[in-house]
Structure formats: C-alpha cells, structure tokens
Image (spheres, grey):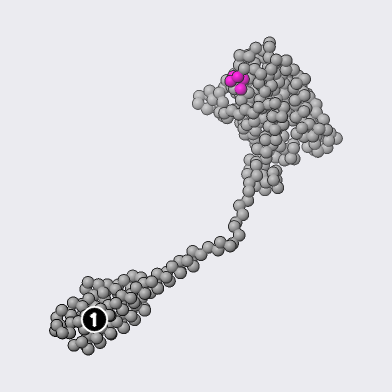
Amino acid sequence: MIGELRERLESLRREVERELEAADEPPRVEEIRVRILGRKGALTAEAKAIGALPVGERPGAGELVNAVKDALEAAIAAREVALAGGALARRLEAEALDVTLPGRRRGQGTRHPLSLVTAELLDVFRRMGFSVARGPEVETLWHNFEALNIPAGHPAREEMDTIYLAGRDLLLRTHTSPVQIRAMESQDPPVRVVCPGRVFRSDTPDASHSPYFHQIEGLWVDEGISLAHLKWALVEFVHQYFGPDVDTRFRPSYFPFTEPSGELDMQCLLCRGAGCRTCKGTGWLELLGCGMVHPAVLEAVGWDSERFTGFAWGMGIERVTMLKYGVPDIRMFFENDVHFLHQFEGR
Ligand code: 2U9
C-alpha cells in the first residue's frame, strides 16, 4: 500500500512540476495550486484518504504526503516569484527612462515689441516726475467724450466712432484721455500722469490703421504751467528716446480738449532730414499731438481754470515703435508671428 502511494505521489509531483514549468502567467500557477492543494485538490484528497488506512501505515503515509505537499508548495512559490520577477523586468524595460539624456530646451519668450516700447516710454516720463495711471477699456460717455469737451454731435465723435454697449451709455474707449479725467476726478491739483493703454476705433485695417491700437498720453496740470513746459518736456522726450541730435518742430493743430493745440514732428531718422520715401520727401515725421488743456476740461472736473493750467499730449505706441524700429506695417504687431516678435528683445 505504502509503495503504491509513494508512486502515485511521485508521479503527481513530477506532473505538477512539469505543469509549473509550462505555466507562463501567474493565473495559470494559481489554477494549478487550487487544483492540487485546494480544498478539493488532488493532494488534499490523498491526505484525507490517510484516515482510511490501517493505523500502522498512517504515520508513514502522512510523512509522504507532507513531504510532497512541502515540495509542491515550494515549487509553486518559486514559480510565482519567477513570473513576478519576469513581469517586473518587462515593465521596467518598457518604462525605462534614460535620465542621462539632455533635456528638451523650451525656448524662452520675449516681450512683445509694444510692451517693450511702452516700458521704455514710461521710463523716460517717470524720470521727468510723471506717475503712471491705467483705466478701464470700457468707458462711460462722460469720461470718454463729455468731460473732454466733445459734446454729442461734435464731429470728433464721428472720427472716433467705436463700439457702444448697454444702451449707448458705455463704449470701448477711443483714447486713453478718460484715464486722465479719472486721475483729476480722484485727486486735487497738481497732477502729473502718463497713461498707456489699448484703445478702439472703427478704422479699417491697412498698413497704418488698426481698429485697436495703443496710446500713451500725458497730462501735467499745476499753477503756472505754460507752453514753455510743454515744449521742454516733449523736446526732451524726443532727445532722450530718439537721440540728442534729432531736430523737432511744432505745427499748429486742433483738438477739442486742448487750446492752443499742436503737433510735434521730428527729423526723419532714416534720411536725417534730407527727404526719403519714409518721410515722403519732407524730411519730417509726425510724432504726436499736444496742447494746453482746454479750460472747459478743467472746469468739467471742478478745477479752477483761472488758477490752474496744464498741458497734455498723446501718441500712438505702434507709430512710435514703427518709427524707432523701422516696422513697415501696423498689422505685424497683431499677427503673432514669432519670427517678427523675437527680433526686439534679448536676441
Ligand atoms: C485731458 C486733456 C487733454 C491728450 C491729447 C492728442 C493731443 C493727440 C493723438 C495722437 C495720435 C491720438 O494716437 S493718436 O491717434 N492724440 O493728438 N492727445 S492732446 O489731451 C488730453 C488728454 C486728457 C484731460
């Protein structure tokens, strides 16, 4: 009897070992374990059968069954470890990361030319004692037109047609002048501010027009401010920003919010006044508009126009950038072509 049992157990062990060898995935090993060592497993059945043997044979039979059970448990565990190791090795290989590879360089951006020039312009005026103010792009009719001596029906409203919101009481600002109105409303004189920002007009785009562009405007109001202060500040600005030898000239002009009004030309940077295509043969480039603040504007914010006087000016930031860097078309600022944008800073 014992001899038969030994043979059965040995052949079972060999067969299970062969099956384990062939099992190439953990679920296959588990299936073998259940089939042999589980509650209804083949080896479990052998163990249960020991009880039916003659008393004298039971210890020997028990030893044999236990020895095979130990051997198979060890073989199953070893196979499980081997398969897990293989799976881990495969995963490690698939997910391998070569940390010695050089990183991918992410190109650093540059400031937009309009941001760059705005910062340069603000620097010049800050050195002259101006502070910087910004305001909303959606404005009231009062701040954009009425306080600036542009009543309903004034032809300047048509020139600065824009998008009106909420029953025509709000609009996209057509200039940054309302920011100066807000500055005056929020403080007592004197005021010395520059106001950069985006403005909107119903212009059809071409090489020199865009329905959105940027302005920088300035205002200095105090007792005793005269045309001489205006002339000094603006000529000084041209010399600081474009060069100390650049010639300037003032021409009379008209704006509703200044009286008298003027325009400042500077010598053409390309031909130095000789006349070329850029200056249309005149030797001069139009740079900005300016004037003494109209008394009606001072009165609109409740300031005594007999006591206080001031000057103001305005210029297009795109225009200044085009003159300074030789940009031929205003639309280039808004096309987001990095080959264009990257030429201005840090390269
Ligand atoms: C207040 C009083 C006066 C601002 C001024 C101009 C002249 C001017 C244009 C230049 C080119 C606009 O971008 S542009 O089209 N601006 O010519 N702007 S005086 O005058 C003010 C502003 C605010 C309270």
Q: Is residue 286 visible?
A: no
Q: Is mark 1 within 8 Å of ligand 1?
A: no
* Front residue of 267 and 161: 267
Residue at the (38%, 71%) spot, across then down: 81
Mark 1 secondary-structure assignment: helix
179 part of magenta stretch: no
x, y percent for residue 228: 77, 20
Residue beneath the point at 59% across and 28% down:
135
Left or right of 170: which side holds 189?
A: right
Residue 30 pos. (x, y %) = 31, 71
The residue beneath circle 1 is 63
Main secondary structure of the magenta stretch: helix
Q: Amino acid at mark 1?
A: Glu
Q: Is residue 184 magenta?
A: yes
Residue 230 in the image, given as x and y percentages of width and height: 74, 22
On the question of residue 99 being in view, the answer is yes
The quarter of the displayed image where residue 157 is located: top right
What range of the chain is rendered magenta? 183-187
